[in-house]
Image (cartoon, helix red, strand yellow):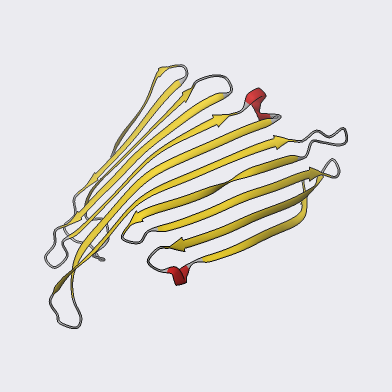
Amino acid sequence: LAGFTWRPAAKLSLFMDFEKAVSDGSYFRTSLYDYSKLSTRARYQVLSSVALAANFSVLDNDNPAAGSTYNFENRNNSLTVFWTPSGGKRVSVTADYTRSTLVSEISYLVPQTLQPGRSYYAERAHTGTAVVDLALPNPGAGAPRLTLGGSLFVSSGTRPAEYYQPLVRLLAPLHKRVSLLGEWRWYGFGETSYGYEAFRTHHFIAGLRFSI
């Protein structure tokens, strides 16, 4: 295990964690065996109201044991932007994008023929999230907060898939310690090769929030 934190400037911070291990046995063939894992993070305060965060991580695992020949690799690259003018009192925006790849390969015996077979899975994905939080004008007890945004996931490879989740949320103060909460989400999922697994649904929430 190794890691460090470095702040070359007041507005810039860098972090790194590294892990390396070598094994002589594992209970499951797909468990971590001979692997290395690296994670790096950086944060930069561009302005008092704008901040950037970047992350990179990679996991590489190999199991060379007889009868296994298992290889697994996962990479993630992400960038996040925060915009909070005046500390986010009236408006705040968060946007995140991640590019990821995953490859898994393992040998096995085909049950019908007892001959060596190969299971291979690859995925290249784009994941995004954007959320806008607004304080609505209100001369009364407090400003209602309106949240708009959502997430998406689009992948290609062995099993291409698409997933979308828009979001609308309203938090309206009714009293000093009581707020009305309303939320709507829509879930949409589909796979090019497995259309029967697709689904679409609306999700509504209404309630009261109490604070002490």
- Asked if 176 appears above or below 209 in the picture, the reply is above
Q: Position of residue 110 (x, y in %)?
A: 19, 77
Q: Pick the quarter of the image with the N terminus.
A: top left
Q: In the displayed image of the protein, which residue is found farthest to the bottom? A: 112
Q: Position of residue 154 (x, y in %)?
A: 43, 52
Q: In the displayed image of the protein, which residue is found farthest to the right? A: 140
Residue 47 in view here? yes
- Picture quarter containing residue 118? bottom left
- Asked if 33 appears above or below 108 in the picture, the reply is above
- Asked if 202 appears above or below 169 in the picture, the reply is below
- Which residue is at 23% across, 49% downward? 35
- Picture quarter containing residue 79? top left
Residue 212 in view here? no
- Which residue is at 42% across, 63% downward? 191
- Picture quarter containing residue 172? top right
- Which residue is at 50% across, 61% downward? 189
Q: Pick the quarter of the image with the C terminus.
A: top right
- Which residue is at 64% across, 43% downward? 148
- Asked if 106 appears above or below 17 in the picture, the reply is below
Q: Position of residue 135 (x, y in %)?
A: 73, 35
Toward the viewer: 81 or 1? 81
Toward the viewer: 36 or 98? 98
Q: Position of residue 111 (x, y in %)?
A: 20, 81
Judge from the rendering whether residue 66 lies leftward or rightward of residue 45; answer left or right.
left
